[in-house]
Amino acid sequence: MNKLLEVKEFDSITCNENYKNEYAYLPEQTFHDLEDFIHSYEADEEKADALDFLKIGYRRHIGTTISVKNYVGLIQMQNGYQVQVLPKISFAEEKDVNNVETKRVFLRMLRSMKDFPSKVFNDANLKMDRMNLYEIFINMYLQEVHQLVKHGIKSTYVAKEDNLNYYKGKLIVGEHVKRNIAHKEKFFVAYDEYHVNRAENRLVKATLLKLQQISNSLENQKTIRQLLTHFEIVDESSNYEKDFAQVVKDRNTKDYEMLIRWSKVFLLNKSFTTFSGSTNARALLFPMEKVFESYVAQELKRSVQSEGWTVSVQDKGHYLFDTPRRFALRPDIVLTRGDGSAVIMDTKWKSLVDNPNKNYGISQADMYQIYAYSKKYGTSEIWLLYPVNDQMRDHDIISYLSDDNVIVNLFFVDVANISESLNELKEALI
């Protein structure tokens, strides 16, 4: 796990050594492993969107290339080589040395997602310049375990069978006769014992032991050793699927909720998205469209709560056609003011260009979609929210007005300074 290729969205990868200074470069065998990873999802309709993340192409004189887009995260090849894809985030002034701030902002964005299993993560003391995403995800898990240990690992009644010198619980007659025909002083019994050796703790211990083998971070290794001391009398899980099936979900096991989801990622090569492990690679990939939408919605709620406004995400109930009800409309964000007036917002993780003659790179389909939202929701206030980039940083709000009084406004969100940016948007809405 000591070999890492770090790229950003929309970069291209080659295995042609003659172009290793112009393109991201992978050794030939690892490049072919990555190709196999892509092809392994082609036949699976549920996971076919892997081809939207990694696309195989051909360039004259260069040969086969793999282009990266839409998804951000980490792919780990079978040989331990990692491809880390970071989002393209624009920073106002300072240079982002070693992508430290990019990783920090990306993690904040990730944590806004409802299904992302990390609530206690603190990046304040994390050495972002030394850690790749996988080590950071490991650190997230370790912080969750630390929180569990702080609250106390849970015990439960564990069913046990044993040949004892005293009677306890329930006699297992068949086994008792078979084992103790010459030992009248013994009893083969089944009984319940209150113990920490429950499925949840076995899975956590198994995950810690696995992470101890694969982590290259001295900081993570030290933390793992410290945490394992709290699980000394817990068995390591020997049957992951069986133990996952025995996990209890109730208010007493709340501290395990996030940990179990992380353990599935590390022990079963699962993922938080539609991608999961294969014989060639495992992937922790996140669709930036969804990450951006979630981050903006979360921060917008905080920004407008003092005004008494409400924010609805992926609003339901409206259809393009009512007879029959078909083609559901799902605007990313519906903001409702105190007087009941609605504002429709759609987030687009796309880098626009400073060229009005090319409509700044806005998709015609996006405009048709947002226009339909306006008509069905009965509002003329429509906003398209794009991430700010270096070209568009100094732009004011861009507006389009139709002859039937629909106004579509373009606003550029600075994800690196999200609070200030959305306060500016709020001021424009008042």
Image (tube, grey):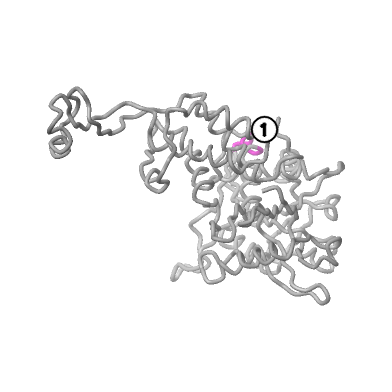
Q: Which quadrant of the figure has residue 233? A: top left
User: Can residue 271 be seen in the rendering of this structure?
Assistant: yes
Task: Name the residue beneath numbered marker 1.
Answer: 219
Q: Amino acid at mark 1?
A: Glu
Q: Position of residue 296 (x, y in %)?
A: 66, 46
Which residue is the extreme one toward the front? 182
Which residue shows up at 70% across the image and 47% down it? Answer: 2
Q: Position of residue 265 (x, y in %)?
A: 53, 48
Q: Which residues are magenta?
A: 303-308
Figure check: 35 above or below 163: below
Q: Nearer the viewer, residue 59 or 425?
A: 59
**Height in image: 189 above or below 275?**
above
Q: Quadrant of the C terminus?
A: top right
Identify the residue at horizontal 27%, vertical 33% (top origin): 160
Label 1: which secondary element: helix
- Residue 141 horizontal side relative to residue 160, left or right: right
Question: Hey, which quadrant is residue 50 in on the image?
Answer: bottom right
Magenta-highlighted stretch: main secondary structure? helix
Q: Is residue 323 left or right of residue 164?
A: right
Residue 327, position as x, y percentages in the image:
51, 67
- Image quarter of residue 99: top right
